[in-house]
Amino acid sequence: MINPKTSVDKIKKYDPPLEGRKNKLRLDFNENTLGCSPNVIKAIKKVTKEDLAAYPEYDPSIKRLSQFVEMKPTELLLTNGIDEAIKVIMETFLNKKDQIIIPTPTFAMFELTASIIGADIIKINYNKDLSFPTKKVLQSITTKTKMVVLVNPNNPTSSSIAKKNILSILKKAKNSIVLIDEAYFEFYGITAKNLLTRYKNLIITRTFSKAWGLAGLRLGYIISNKCIIANLQKVISHYSVNTLALTAMNAALSDTKYVKNYVKKVKASKQYLLKELKKLKIKTYPANANFVIADFGKKCNAVCNQLRKKNILVRNRSKYPLLQDCLRLGIGTLEQSKILINSIKDILRKKAILFDMDGVLVDVNQSYRLTIKKTVEYFTKQTVTNRDIQKLKEKSGFNNDWDLSEALILGRGVKISKNGVIQKFQSFYLGEKDTKGLINNEKWLLPKKTLTNLSQKYSIGIVTGRPKAEALYILKKFGVEKYFDTLIAMEDYPPSKAKPDPFSINLALKQLNCSAAVYLGDSLDDIIAAKRAGIQSIGIPPPGNSSKILNSLLKKNGADIVLKNCNKLTEVLQ
């Protein structure tokens, strides 16, 4: 295999979740939720075979755009979306090792493109309240600075940059390119365009993807002085903007009233959304675009997943700096925001179903149980039966299979370190080198149809003693990860707080924002932990267990019901 250049090899692929979004309420990519002007559709329908067979002609469209933007044609450049605009600008002005300042969190394409070029990226965090870090940016600008990126309003924070702060940066960075992304200009209404005559280092990018409703046609444009535009024209692909995009742009510009009306609807919708989120005690930040950042706390993932199940798409921005536990909620019409708020209210009121994993969701007889047997026999050279294992399982304090294995070994008169037990256990369970691990023997027990039905009525989570990586491996293997709103695994709580301590169950309830719940488990520790957490419990003996003792113990220790398996779970919960 031929490897790419080093800068490409090091970066992670930008992989936004763009598939399967049709027929859903799309509040995840800040698009126009009503679509483009009807004029656009009419114009595209008139496109002829000859139009498509010929290369696009740009001059009439650039002239039309220049009239709308009130700039000269020589001060504009059409691009294949803002993505291409960013790429062309950086390829024109940045060399490898050149310094670029990028306040973050922001649109991923800035860092991605600069990384491919091999530029020296200086990332500066926004302030904790998500306001623009003017002072830190000004302090970072030096004679080495080649470019400063400003996004106004910023994505994903929706915060803006005051004009006086932009002026300060333009003055300080007089020998650097200052790139201002105005993708959300229509919603914000303030532009730096009037500064172009005073500052020859200023470049502005805009798009037809957002307010104009043309994201599918990939059309953006660059505004700057004619010298910068002339240099950009040397780099840009000569036919990157296609005929359909030009046709759509001209039609859209003939119906600016449509966009103005849509922006008006979004602004009214924004006020409603912010007011309702405040009522729900969900923290939000100042929003200057058609989206808002909302802090859902520990229930962030659950709310995002549950909204998806209701065919409402929002973006989870928890992995971005300063945005832990935050969702980015796109703003559409008032009717759409009401659907969003009502769905959030419904989710926050939902009862939760929590599952133990081993023996309840997954048949582990030929994986964990067999691993225990092999581990103990390896160290003791003595036979271990399933009944030997089950006897300990029927006692409290042996929910962790490493602990159980150690207890069986010590009970046979062999002393071995806990780390030694864990290493051998994991070698059997996960496999080593060319040996296939016993984890691959596991079988999923709960039908997807049942999971689908439950996920529509309840928030669903898993509370397990497994390491998280092993739990995720099985969920992904059987294609069921999307059904679960939270996963509490071994790493999420200290060893002293393992079941029967209710800590892990309470943590799941906190993340799901639910107080009413039911927990399904196959051991005494599961049932005792549920009881201590103050929620209902359902006992489900593990597959292959024929012992009446366990059923009796589960009931005795607080199980409200004991089922043979999960097949009749939906009936019991109704």
Image (spheres, rainbow, N blue to C red):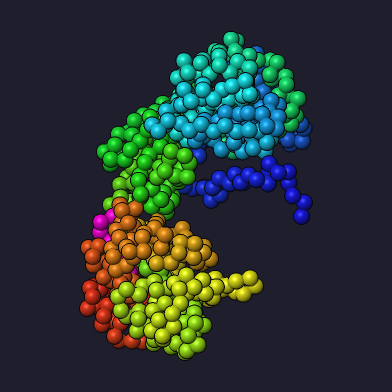
Magenta region includes residue 323:
no
Image point (39%, 71%), residue name: 400
Foreground of the two, 325 or 333:
325
Q: Report whether 237 appears left or right of 569.
A: right
Q: As rendered, which of 181 and 465 lies closer to the eye? A: 465
- Kindly give the residue lying farthest to the top in the view shown: 198
Kindly tell me whether residue 203 is visible in this rendering: no
The percent position of residue 254, horizontal first and vertical second, equals 57, 22
Q: Is residue 516 visible?
A: yes
Q: Position of residue 50 (x, y in %)?
A: 76, 33
Picture residue at 33% right of the left edge, 54% below the top: 512
Q: Residue at x 28, y 63 (%)?
A: 502
Magenta segment: 514-520
- Residue 257 sits above or below residue 474 on the image: above
User: Image quadrant of residue 113?
Assistant: top right
Figure disc tally = 0
Q: Quadrant of residue 555?
A: bottom left
**Residue 518 colored magenta?**
yes
Q: Depth check: 278 or 129 in front?
A: 129
Tell me what residue is drawn at x 68 percent, y 19 percent. 228
Q: In the displayed structure, does residue 39 sit left or right of residue 307?
A: right
Above or below, 213 relative to 553: above
Say if 276 sits above or below 550 in the image: above
In which quadrant is the C terminus drawn? bottom left
**Which residue, as the protein is rendered here, is positioned at the far bottom?**
383
**Residue 28 in the image, given as x and y percentages of width and height:** 47, 42
